[in-house]
Image (cartoon, rainbow, N blue to C red):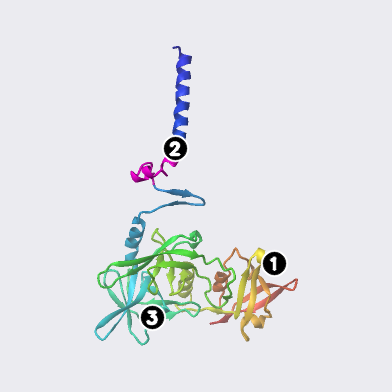
Amino acid sequence: MNKKQIVLVIIITAVIVWVADLLAGNYLSARLSTASWARKFNLFNPQAQLVVTNRETVRVNNGNDAVEAAENAKSKLSTLIYFENGKVTTTGSAINWTSDGYLVTTKAALAPGGKVFAIVTSNGDVFPVETSYPDPASNLVLLKTSAQGLAVLDPSNNDDLRVGQQVLGLQNSVGNRMTRFATGYISRLSSDTYGAVLESDLVSRSYSVQVNGGFAPATAIMNLSGRMVGVWDGQNVISVDDVRLLVNNFLNDQKQIVRPSFGFSYQMLSESESKILQTVSGARVMGLAAGKSAADSGIRVNDVIVEWGGKAVNNSINFDSILRQTKPNQTIRVKVYRSGTNLELNLVSGTM
């Protein structure tokens, strides 16, 4: 054969091999893998890890992710206890937040009244709780101890959370210095506020987790990368973003918790809802407390807040976070939509 014939034979052979591989890989193996005799002998069973690509890449883990996350996080968690009648009682967790002895827990973990609490670190060191700072706007409590050099958790960015994402609830065990964890799945994001009536003076946005096995009070909620996404308060997960904002404000406000007060409830209206109701999207005022800042400013029930302190209010922003960042006794320019008219009002925030 001459060179042209040899090249032609190579091309034809390559095409035949490609077509055969396409049929065997994408059609025949898929058909054969469903046959009972093939399943019996585990033939045509794909061995590669499953990868699904949509907005992000997700691989099916074999359990090692959870083990590694728990192992990496346990030194950054403490256990809340009290000692009475010769017995140590564990009431929940405390999350190491600063290296110089500030920890985060919840009111449920401190529920037994009249007790002297202490925290036990992962290596067994015990530090009495010197001062507790309950947050009037949430179920969070900050604890002050004399601990130094604490390892602290790495907060996550909750913009990355997705419904159906697996999370872990981690808690250290005092007796054998082991870490207990339960698994769960995010069933509702904090940004999903459809139909919910939220309170302006409270941390109203939390996300829900479908729990497998149950979480103890103040359990740290982690993603599979070992980063903290929130704190279990007994019913829902308080976002790590709210925890971060609380502690940052506490440290900047001479180590005291100072929260603003407004005195109204609201419901977020999406664009589709606002069209149905023939109004505009924003935060529709559902109720007012007499003698509070909102009522005194001239805001009325059914007003739709469309701007707060120069920031647009709509479903794409976290209005609750904007409210939390307002300082007490601060004058805020509020724009509301009322009966087809935009009005600008001055609101002076109160103090909780």
Residue 110: mark in rendering: 3
Q: Position of residue 339 (x, y in %)?
A: 74, 73
**Label 1 vs label 3, nearer the camera:** 1
The answer to whether residue 303 is magenta is no
Disc 1 designates what residue? 276
Disc 2 designates what residue? 28
Is 9 on the left-hand or right-hand side of 76?
Answer: right
Q: Position of residue 111 (x, y in %)?
A: 39, 82
**Nearer-the-camera pick, 2 or 56:** 2
- Which comes sooner in the sequence, label 1 or label 3? 3
**Label 2 vs label 3, nearer the camera:** 2
Cα separation between marks 2 and 1? 52 Å
- Which residue is at a point 28% across and 73% down the rendered structure image? 174
Quadrant in the picture for residue 270: bottom right
Judging from the image, what secondary structure is the residue with disc 2 in? helix
Q: Position of residue 220 (x, y in %)?
A: 39, 68
For the residue marked with disc 2, what is the amino acid? Leu
Magenta residues span: 26-48
The answer to whether residue 36 is magenta is yes
Cα separation between marks 1 and 3? 46 Å
**Label 2 vs label 1, nearer the camera:** 2
- Which residue is at a point 26% across and 72% down the rendered structure image? 124
Image quarter of the N terminus: top left
Cα separation between marks 2 and 3? 62 Å
Q: How many marks?
A: 3
For the residue marked with disc 1, what is the amino acid? Ile
Please tell me whether residue 60 is drawn above or below residue 345 in the rendered image. Answer: above
Quadrant in the picture for residue 277: bottom right
- Which residue is at a point 67% across and 79% down the rendered structure image? 301
Marks 1 and 3 in Cβ contact (< 8 Å): no
Q: How would you rate the neighbour count of disc 1 (Cα within 10 Å): few for under 14, some for 14-19, many for 20 or more?
A: few
Is 262 on the left-hand or right-hand side of 239?
Answer: right
